[in-house]
Amino acid sequence: MSTTESLILVLTTVSTESSANEISQKLLEDGLAACIQVEEKVRSHYRWQGKLIIENECRLAIKSIDSRWKSLRKSLEECHPYEIPEIIKVNIDDCSDDYRRWIISQMTQANT
């Protein structure tokens, strides 16, 4: 894995901290993420089945590399508790060189 590997940020939400922790553990154990931040009590407003919904959720900010994107997305789709989960990929165009190297080193270690 080269230091020019593209970094990505993947966002998703779940209804409980327990679900967030389970997903985080699976992605880290499977080598699909280098770091996952869980934000509790994110208030989501949306329309579902014709109704306006407001509820607290946990947001996961998953840091990974683009070459793992397809596997990461598939894993999220399989383990996510929602019928239609939010799974958004954001390309990281720029970040500090040290942070880039750290992410890539974590992903390399996950393969060993």
Image (cartoon, helix red, strand yellow):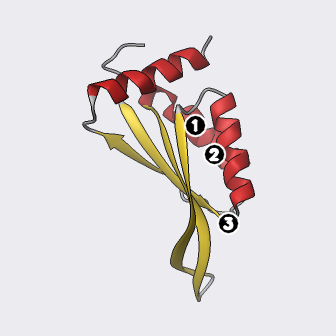
Q: Is residue 1 visible?
A: yes
Is the residue under label 3 in contact with that under label 2 (CB below 8 Å)?
A: no
Q: In the image, what residue type sits under mark 2?
A: Leu
Q: Is residue 42 above or below residue 105?
A: below
From the top left corner, tell me how far across and down residue 107 is, in percent: 52, 22
Within 10 Å of disc 1 (Cα), the crowding (few <14, some 14-19, many 20+) is: many
The mark that comes first in sequence, 1 or 3, is 3
User: Within the image, what quadrant is residue 102 found in?
Assistant: top left
Helix, strand, or loop for circle 1? helix
Q: CA distance from mark 1 to mark 3?
A: 20 Å
What residue appears at the point 58 percent right and 31 percent down from the top-left corner?
A: 32
Task: Assess whether mark 2 and mark 1 are in contact (beta carbons under 8 angstroms).
Answer: yes
Q: Residue at x 61, y 26 (%)?
A: 31
Residue 76, disc: 2
For the residue labelled by badge 2, is the local secondary structure a helix, a strand or a loop? helix
Q: Quadrant of residue 48?
A: bottom right
Q: Residue type at mark 1?
A: Leu
Comparing 99 with 61, the one in front is 99
Left or right: 104 with respect to 28?
left
Badge 1 is on which residue? 72
| x 36%, y 13%: residue | 2
Is the residue 39 above or below the residue 70 in the image? below
Q: Quadrant of the C terminus?
A: top right
Q: Which mark is residue 15?
A: 3
Given the image, on which type of amino acid does mark 3 rest?
A: Ser
Q: CA distance from mark 2 to mark 3?
A: 15 Å
At mark 3, the secondary structure is loop
Q: Answer with left or right where residue 81 lies relative to residue 72.
A: right
From the viewer's perspective, is the residue at label 2 or at label 3 nearer?
3
